[in-house]
Image (cartoon, helix red, strand yellow):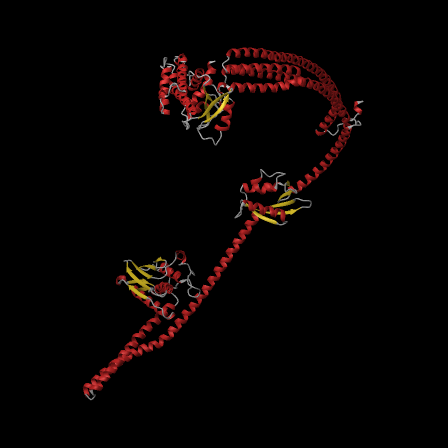
Amino acid sequence: MMSQLSVRSRLIILSGMLLCTLIFTNLFLTAKLENNSRAVATETELSEVIESATGARIAFGEMRYWLADLAVSLLTASERNAAAARTRMDGYLEQLAKQKPALVAKVRVERAAFEQSANDAVDKYTNDQRVLGNSLLAQARNHSVKVDEYLTGLVDELRGELTAERQRITGEVRAATKSTMIADLAILALGVLLTFAILRSIAIPLRELVATIDRLSAGDLSVSIPAASPNEIGAMAGALGLFRDSLRARDRFAAEAETQRKTIAAAIATISEGFVLYDSDDRIVLFNDQFRAIYPGLSDVIRRGMGFDELLESVISRKLVDLGSKSPEQWIAERKAQHQGSDDFVEYQYRERYVRISERSIQGGGSVAIYTDITELRRRNIELEQARDSAEIALRELQTAQDRLIQSEKLASLGQLTAGIAHEIKNPLNFVNNFSSLSTELIDELNDLLGSVAMDTAAIDTKVRAEMDELTQMLKRNLEKVVKHGKRADSIVKNMLLHSREGVGERRPADINAIVEESLNLAYHGARAEKSGFNITLERDLDPSAGIIDLYPQEITRALLNLISNGFYAANKRKEADNGGFKPSLTAITKNLGHMVEIRIRDNGTGIPADVREKMFNPFFTTKPAGEGTGLGLSLSHDIVGNQHGGKIEVDTESGKFTEFIITLPRAAAAKTQAGGLN
Amino acid sequence: MVRAHFKSVVFVAILIGATFLLRPLGAASDDDAAIATSLADMLRAARQVISNNQVRINDPNLGDKGLTGRVVLEQALVIYKKNTGTDPASIDPASRHGRLLRAQMDAIVEATDANQATINAKGVGFKGFIPAVFARLVNEAFENRAKNEAQVKVTAPEQLVRNRKARPDAWETDVIRTKLVQPDWARGEAYSAETQISGRQAFRMMMPEYYAASCLTCHGSPKGETDITGYPKEGGKEGDLGAVISVTLLK
């Protein structure tokens, strides 16, 4: 029958029965407690009466004492104390009169008689009537005994009543306790039986259901569901059947899904790039081994379910990415923005690798990221860029060299022109020089002739003679000047021819001091001719013992001209920068070193910086503005001294102060180079 | 009984043993007033002697103190003469003044000699033979000697009286309440009047006495605290009215 009831009905029946027994017990206890309360109230009243009677008795005792004390001491303080005790006693008697009025009336009569006798006795003592006082005090004592008897008797009577009341209460409480215990035991037994029966009716089918659920949880979908009864447990059994059916369907779908997943995973695994699928919460759903291979530093942490944020933090914490100038927080924020915001690609450097990440959002949330290792591709691009840069540099250098070649070609043409012009000038200059020399001789002959005529004829006036002498002398001096400057012009033209002539000329012994002197003059005049207003102080310290050296004079002159011209340029440049006050100077020094001869060309110009010193002997290297230098001067000089003559050329300089070139030439030529000049 | 005796006399003794501010009466020409004043002065003088000898009296190591009635009287006369400028010997013994003063001096000797056992008790410290007790004994002895002629009593406002014997009678209570304790009553001024006692005409004089600092040991603060005699202190202050010497001369 119980199994046909619902669980709720069964529990209501159980609770209702337990509740009823509880209410019954409470009603019983309440009735007993009320009875006890009344008994306790009675007891309390009796206790209060006893307390009042006892208080009155004590107060009377005090009153009696203080009156006796007053009789002896006559002190007014005792009188006041007796009065206070009397007042207290009146209070107690007033309370007592509510319960025992007749007795209180008798007490008051006796106490009044006592007071009267006692006060009279005190007055007699005060007036030194001791005998009368004693007599009156004896009377008072009789009254006080009566009062004491009344009150003591009352207290004893009340205490008897109180004891009887207490015994009655105790008996009732004991009986109530016994009844309550019996009722409790009966209720307990009934409750236990009912609880056991009802719980059993619930627990057995529930246990069967639990066993079924356990088997289902263990994966046994073949389990049979207990028969459904028309109550909650039956409903649960029905639901469990539906649940078992849904599990069977789920397993079927899961098997199909697993097949699909494996197919997709196999496809993804074949992709050469790293592949990652993130869900809508940016957690890794799927990835392939290539993704792990791209990030070897993260292979131990990459897993399904890993968040994108966690991935970025691992990258930062393991210092896998080159942050550049960004802070870790900035890099993460930027990366997340790219991840969430765009369907574009980004490239990052992870240690020595470069990775391109292409990210695409997918429908329904989440995203797909393709990670491509572009390290090799990038390296090739860099190499291509470097090759292109090198080609561009070479092209620029080639263009520069071409410009300089054009410049040197122009200079070469100028040299040829100079040689032609010098040759043309030399012919008329020879006429000038020859005829001026001849005229000088003719002047001498004229003077001799005039002298002989004068001595022979004496026909010429002395005064005329003197004027003629003076004119011929003047004419002679003029002609000598013409000869002197004509020779000088001839020397310049010769030098021009010498310098512009192709080839190295012949090797022969030559005076080194003369070569230095000639080079100084040629450079000086060349510079003055090139730039009006040019001036410099030339100093010479030529060792007379320097002597003769076997060399190519034309080539050495060319080398010296280059060094001297550079010295002029540097000194003049410093002068221009100095804005007056600076005096440019150049010094040429020769020194006999025995088998060697040393030539020093020193200027007080701008000096040569260290970086220029390294490259200054390179062909086509120049610091002069375009069009002013070819970059070949020092290169040729180095070649002439070193290769052609077996000597050496060194430089000592201090930036902003001076430059000194030191040429050392062997006295006997090395004859390294054949005639025909430089290539 | 001994305890009661002590308590009864402590109050007056302390009052008299102290230095009271007292103004002599101005009505010297009035015989009744002069006699009453003289009796009060003699009582104060004798009381002063007992006060001066308290340390000696209460010395437990000393037996015979040598403080006989004759000795006390001699010292009292010296004080009396000094305070009043009058030698009692110069007063006519046959006159009422001389007769009453003689009776009072005899009472002093009687009261002292009657208590020699107490005064000379060895091994007892505080003996309770204080000026107040002594004054009451002298007054009682004087009353016996001058019966039907004169009476001397030391009383006080009712709330300050410790011993019932010192309680003021109706006339004294009225004088204290309406005169002596009034704010406008001149300090130290005595009050006197002709009145009736038990059908007899009588001259009565009330002479106020005030608390000095030494009185407050027993009568001062805190109020209710027990003093050396076991009596609660009254909470009095220096200068408060503490006692009144009441003299009655029956006609």
Q: At which x and y percent is residue A383?
A: 53, 51
Which image quadrant for residue A482? bottom left
Image spot of residue A225 (x, y percent): 77, 27
Q: Nearer the viewer, residue A212 or A530?
A: A212
| Residue A521 higher or lower than A369, as above or below | below
Residue A189 position in % (x across, y down): 73, 17
Choose between B145 and A172: the one closer to the eye.
B145
Horizontally, residue A24 falls left or right of residue A627, namely right
Observer-nearest residue: A109 or A508?
A109
Instruction: Give how far across and how far down residue A345 sits, in percent.
Output: 61, 49
On the picture, is B29 further left or further right than A449? right
Visible residue check, residue A395: yes
**Viewed as shown, does residue A195 lie left or right of B10?**
right
In this rendering, does residue A290 appear at all? no
Picture quadrant of residue B32: top left
Q: Which image quarter: residue A12?
A: top right
How many circles with numbers are drawn on the protein? Answer: 0
Against A264, residue A526 (above or below) is below
Q: Is residue A385 above or below residue A87?
A: below
| Direction bottom: furthest residue | A459
